[in-house]
Image (tube, helix red, strand yellow):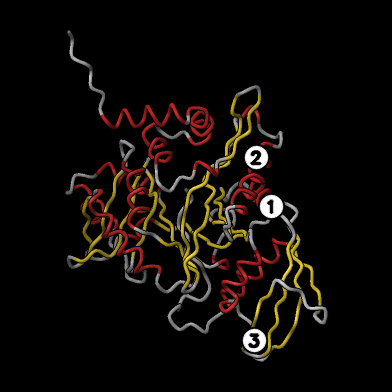
Amino acid sequence: MSSPTLIPRTTRIIDSIITKYKEFFVVYQKAFHETDPRIAEIFSSSSYVPEFSSFVKVDQKVVSYGGIRKKSLRIFNLSEKVPFIFGIVTLPEERKKGYASENLKALLNKTYHANYNIIMIASNPHDEHLIRFYEKFGFNKFSYQKRIPFENLFKKGFDIRLGCMDDCEEICKIFNKYIENYKLSLERDLEFTRNKVREVLADDYGKLFFLSKNNENYGYFLYRKGEIDESLILLEGEPNEDLAIIENTFTTKGFKDVFEGLLNSKYAECTVSAAECTPESDAFTLFRIINPMNFMKKYINYIYFDDTETFNKNIIVEDPLIKDCSFNINKNGKDIKVSEKLDSDAITIKITISDLTKKILNNFLNNNTEERFTIKNKFFCCESW
């Protein structure tokens, strides 16, 4: 009797995930050209929320798909769980038939009924049509990532070290140090970081590098497909190392191919303000409020208003994609209250969900009362996945 053939565990996981989500894989891979191992990592990740997935079938075939991952934002001193749309994709031959709109409406309503307050999505900055499409659904740009020369990562006297899965706690440490002065920023816990690194390393050429100076790590970058997938450094103001020394360091350490990939891709990214962003080339994340009443109650004390201002307003928020809502804001000097009950003596103001989102984001930036948050004019969200 012959012995059974043992299938490596990684292969079993990939096979089982692909079997479970086979129809989604077809749509997703045609759009993003990812490898089976990487997509298997995405769909098996604890951050992926299959119950929020939406899809359109035509003749029993999935032709359009929308997927969500769980993320977390820190808004001033409060934490906010956020659904992040990491892909709304339609088969090329089925586009321009309204399927993406159906998926996006479904995702907005699913997350609203699951009691989330906000939702995020990333967009290709070069696709103006797609950006306008998302804006029609109430999304607003809120976090800008500017392309910078990759040399900016490598400071005078730097060294590099190849990282692995065991280094995820060190990534969290650098990440949390970097974001601590932002009013609104992405949050990362160890589990999320492990998912991120595992997905990058699933590719044959995926690598994690740490950057150090005087034996202390000052940053890291994730490298995949010849490009920097993500990078953070704590020494942004320090002078860069000479390109020849950067090349020699990578070559000496046995990573000449990585240096050549960096040389070809040319760019890393850093967070900038809206004023510093070049819309034609720089990336950004889009943000939408989906439950205005709950959001206002939670964050009213962080929304900037003049301390001397006094008003009593009924706010009617128009949101045809989910549902309209209304609430009252009563402000008397520094005292401010939000109520679901409208006041017959108040002024009534109507506002679209898009304009409300934009106004709140601007008022967050204008709130300079919290001394801890020294970065005044930008938010931080570095991921598009």
Q: Residue furthest front?
A: 341
Which amino acid type corresponds to the residue marked 3 in the rendered image?
A: Asp
Left or right placement of residue 99 versus residue 236 in this view: right
Q: What is the distance, in whole Å, between disc 3 and disc 1 at their CAs?
A: 30 Å
Residue under numbered circle 3 = 306
Residue 125's x, y, as percent? 57, 51
Left or right placement of residue 372 versus residue 177 in this view: right
- Using the image as rendered, state which of residue 234 and residue 39 is in the foreground: 39
In what element is the residue under mark 2?
helix
- Using the image as rendered, state which of residue 82 and residue 240 is in the foreground: 82
Q: Is residue 3 above or below residue 121?
A: above
Residue under numbered circle 1 = 137
- Using the image as rendered, state which of residue 58 and residue 293 is in the foreground: 293
Residue 179's x, y, as percent? 40, 68
Residue under numbered circle 2 = 100
- Residues tagged 1 and 2 counted as in contact (Cβ below 8 A): no
Which amino acid type corresponds to the residue marked 1 in the rendered image?
A: Phe
Q: Earlier in the sequence, mark 3 or mark 1?
A: 1
